[in-house]
Image: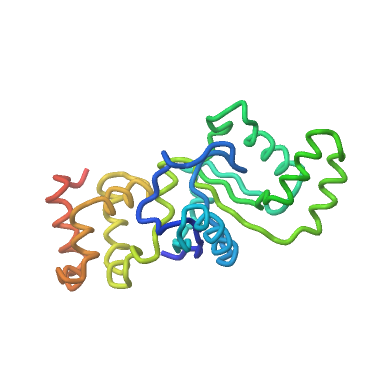
Amino acid sequence: MMGLQVYHGSYTKIDAIDLSKAHANRDFGKGFYVTKFHKHAETWSKVIGRKRGTEGFVTEFKFYERAFTDETYKTLRFDDYNEEWLDFIVLNRDLDFTANRHDYDIIEGPVADDKVQNRINDYLSDKISKSVFLEELKYHEQTHQICFCTRKSLQMIVPVEDEPNYNTIKISEPLLETLMIDRNLNEIEATDLFYSSKTFSKLADETTDFYKKTWQEIYELLKQELNISPL
C-alpha cells in the first residue's frame, strides 16, 4: 500500500491514537494532527516536550492518501492559504464551541502558526482587512497539516513500525479482493475486517511463519475465524 510519510510531534511516542485526548478549537477542529514536514513536527515536539519535562518525540506514520478519492470518507483539502481556509480556521477556533463545527473525516491544509494566529486576531478585531491579511499570507513559509477527525479516519493512518512487511502485503492484496467479492464489501470494510482479525495478527508476526503460506491458505483460516462463507 503506497502512502505519504507524515509525522506527529509530541512529548512522548504515540503507540495508539486516542481522539478523546485531542484538544478542541484547533485549526481544523478536534482531531489527531500530523504533518509531512519532519522539521515542523520536531520543532513542536521540543516545545511541548519542554512543557512536560521531556526531550519530545516524533512518531512517524504512513497515511493512505486514497482516502481523498474514496467516497466513503468525507474530506476537505486546502491547497494554500486562501479566503475559504481563513473562514474555516475562524469557525473552528471559536471558543464558544468545544465540539467540532463540521462533519469531515479528514482535512488537509496549511497551519495557522503563532505568527498567523496573531494576524487572525488582528483581522477579527478589525485592525486589518481580510484582503490585507490574505496578501500577507502569500509570503508566509510553506506549512502543512492533516487532521484526522473521526475514529473512522484512523483506518487511513498507521505507525510506520506497524506497517505490514512486503510478504504480508503480497498475501493481503488478493485475499482482500476475494473477501470483498465473497462478502460484497467495499475496500475500506474488507480492510478493516481483515486487519482487525487474529489471522492478520499472526500473519504480521514473522515468528509464526504464516507469511510462508499461500494467500488461499490464509484466507481459509480467516473464514474459519470469522465464520464466513461465500454469498
Horizontal placement of 180 versus 90: left or right? left
Residue drawn 23% across the image and 58% down it: 200
The N terminus - image quarter:
bottom left
Q: Nearer the viewer, residue 148 or 181?
A: 148
Percent position (x, y) of residue 180?
A: 31, 50
Q: Nearer the viewer, residue 14 or 210?
A: 14
Percent position (x, y) of residue 185?
A: 33, 45
Horizontal placement of 114 versus 52: left or right? right
Percent position (x, y) of residue 95?
A: 62, 30
Horizontal placement of 83 versus 186: left or right? right
Residue drawn 49% across the image and 51% down it: 67
Horizontal placement of 83 versus 153: left or right? right
Instruction: Classify 22 as above or below 206.
Output: above
Residue drawn 24% across the image and 64% down it: 204
Q: Residue furthest top?
A: 96
Q: How many marks?
A: 0
Percent position (x, y) of residue 138?
A: 81, 56
Instruction: Classify 24 as above or below 79.
Output: above
Instruction: Classify 42 as above or below 101.
Output: below
